[in-house]
Image (tube, helix red, strand yellow):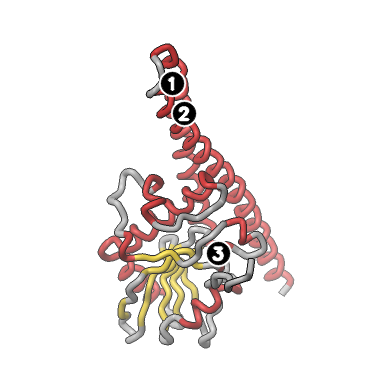
Amino acid sequence: MTSSLVIQYQAQVKLREKDRVLRQQDRRLFELVAESQRLSNLVIHADSSPAHNRPAAEDRTAELVKLRAEAETLRKQVDELGKQRTQSRPPHPSHRLLWPGPNIHSVAGVSVVSDADSEEYAKQLAQMASENRKLADARNLSRGVRWYVPAHQGELPLTFDQAAPYFYADQEPPRTSEFEMVFQGSRNELTNVPEGAVILIRERQAWPTPRGRWARIYVMVSGEVSVVEANDNFQSWEAEHIIPPPSAGQQ
C-alpha cells in the first residue's frame, strides 16, 4: 500500500508539473497570437500610408514573420504537451457521468467516454469519429475559437466565421455547419471552473454506435476533444458539462 501511494504521489507531481508548464506555454502562445494580430494591423495600416513610412512597414513585416514562426513552434510544443497530459491524466471527477460504470479511455489524444470497459471498443469509437474528417474538423474549430480569444480580450466568438482567420492554414476549412458553439461569453468567467469540465463545441448530429447507442464529438474549453457514447440523449453528460446562460436580470 505504501509503495502504491508513493507511485501515485509521484505521478500526481509529474502531472501537476506538466499542467504548470502547459499553462505557461498556453499563456505565452495567447500573448504571441495577440501580438501577431497587432502587428498585422500595423503592417496593413503602414502599407496604405505614404511612401516615406514604408521602411517602418518593412521592419514590422520582418518582425511579424519572426513572431509567427515563434508562435507556430510554441503551438506545436503546446499540442504535444497537451497530448501527453491527456494520455497521463486519470479521469477527472467532472468526467464522471450519471449512468453507472463510466469509463474514459485516451485514444490518440482523444478522450472516449462510455460505460463499456473495452479499450478495443474505445478505439473503435475513436475510429468512427475520425471518419469523414469529423475529428479533424473538431480540432480545427477548437484551434480557431481558442486562438480568437486572446486577440479579443478574452471574449469567445459568437460564430465560427469570426474565428475563421485562426483555423489551421494547411488544412481544409472545417465544416462549420456540422458543429455548434455551446459556451459563449468570456473565458474570464471560468476563473473558478476547470476548463476541461465545460463544453465549448458540440457536434450537431449524433451517430449510431455498434452497441445500439449514440455518440457525438465534444470539444471542451480547455481544447480537449471527447467522443461520448450515451443512451439517454446525452442528458446526463451535458447536465454536468454545460454552463447555462444567465437568466434575464442576472449578471
* Front residue of this view, candidates 162 and 85: 162
Check residue 242 in the rendering and tell me which mark sits there, or answer none: none
Query: Residue 237: x percent and y percent?
Result: 49, 78
Q: Earlier in the sequence, mark 2 or mark 1?
A: 2
Q: Earlier in the sequence, mark 3 or mark 2?
A: 2
Q: Quadrant of residue 201?
A: bottom left
* Front residue of this view, candidates 13 and 67: 67
Q: Amino acid at mark 3?
A: Gly
Q: Quadrant of residue 160?
A: bottom left
Q: Amino acid at mark 1?
A: Ala
Q: CA distance from mark 1 to mark 3?
A: 41 Å
- The relative height of residue 144 versus residue 116 in the rendered view (above or below) is above
Which residue position is annotated with label 2?
42
Q: Residues within 10 Å of mark 2 (few under 14, many from 20)?
A: some
Under circle 2, the secondary element is: helix
Outermost front residue? 249
Which residue position is annotated with label 3?
196
Residue at position x 39%, y 13% from top? 51
Q: Given this view, does label 3 or label 2 mark the residue nearer the observer?
A: 2
Q: In this figure, what is the number of numbered marks?
A: 3
Query: Residue 38: x percent and y percent?
Result: 50, 34
Q: Quadrant of the C terminus?
A: bottom right
* Front residue of this view, candidates 154 and 144: 154
Under circle 3, the secondary element is: helix
Residue at position x 37%, y 49% from top? 164
Q: Quadrant of the N terminus?
A: bottom right
Query: Residue 47: x percent and y percent?
Result: 38, 23
Outermost right residue? 2
Check residue 57 in the rendering and tell me which mark sits there, or answer none: 1
Q: CA distance from mark 3 to mark 2?
A: 35 Å
Q: Amino acid at mark 2?
A: Leu
Pointer 2 with pointer 1, Cβ within 8 A? yes
